[in-house]
Image (tube, rainbow, N blue to C red):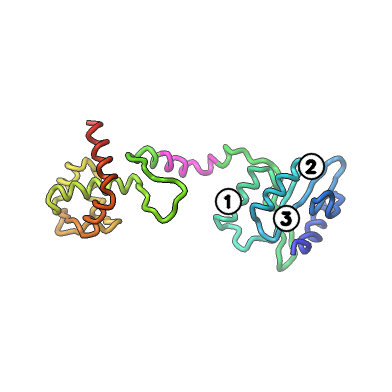
Amino acid sequence: MEKELFNPIKKYFESRGYTVDGEVDGMDMYMKRGEETAAVELKQTLDFRVFQQAALRQKLVDTVYVGTFNPKNMRSKAVRDKIYILKRLGIGLIAVSKRTGRVELISDAVVSPLENFKKLNHTRSEHASEEFNKRRTKGNTGGVTGEKLITSYREDALLVLDALVDLGGEAKGKDVAALSDIKRATTIMHSNFYGWFKKVSTGVYSVTDAGYNALEEFEETVFLLKKNGSEKC
């Protein structure tokens, strides 16, 4: 219950010089320290509703916090993503241990500049840009699940597969690389991530039934890849 959060958090802020009361103009916890005003929205778990409530409270007070029970797995991606949103909104997060009642300030109520997060995620940002630039067809539909994405790796693998078929369904890696213009052709066939290839002997690979099926499934993609390739020549 949210009311179990009230007393521990109330004592926490009182120890920092605030005068605190509950249910003031719809706010779960309202407090003042001199001319400074603050509010805490209490919620058992972090969800969109409490984010919305806390953001609306920013219209009324100087500082807003969300008070919740200590998440079971603070290091989980789901929790870290929620803390990120709160930091970007400038909403603080304070957590209470269900077992001990200990109160911990997880993050302060200050807006964290986006640049700080961009620096921390620089590698991932570069990877996204690189992956986008490498994709030739750019034919994926966003917002869908359960569909096979056309990544840059899948595009390369399809060109390798198509070249191997054109070479009679069995060939040396260097010949496939030359025909497909994919330098890592041998590596792709050796890795066999999609199950399209079979190693026949050293440096020689053949097409599996799954490979032939893939050429039918991705016929339009292969057509676009080859068309784009010929237009660049």
Q: Report whether 78 appears left or right of 16.
A: left
Q: Position of residue 41 (x, y in %)?
A: 75, 53
Of residue 39 and residue 115, the one placed in the foreground of this image is 39
Q: Position of residue 52 (x, y in %)?
A: 68, 48
| Residue drawn at point x = 41 percent, y = 56 percent | 146
Quadrant of the snapshot with the C terminus:
top left
* Residue underneath mark 3: 67
Foreground: disc 1 or disc 2? 2
Q: Is 16 one of the magenta-colored residues?
A: no
Q: Report whether 118 appears left or right of 135.
A: right
Q: Which labelled disc corresponds to residue 186?
A: none
Name the element at disc 2: loop
Going by the numbered disc 1, the residue's amino acid type is Asp
Characterize the magenta stretch by its predominant secondary structure. Answer: helix
Going by the numbered disc 3, the residue's amino acid type is Gly
* Residue underneath mark 2: 60
Q: Position of residue 162 (x, y in %)?
A: 20, 48
Magenta stretch bounds:
118-129
Name the element at disc 3: strand
Of residue 132 and residue 177, the one placed in the foreground of this image is 132
Above or below: residue 129 compared with residue 43: above
* Residue underneath mark 1: 81
Name the element at disc 1: helix
Q: Position of residue 16 (x, y in %)?
A: 82, 50
| Residue drawn at point x = 22 percent, y = 50 percent | 161
Q: CA distance from mark 3 to mark 2?
A: 18 Å
Quadrant of the snapshot with the N terminus:
bottom right
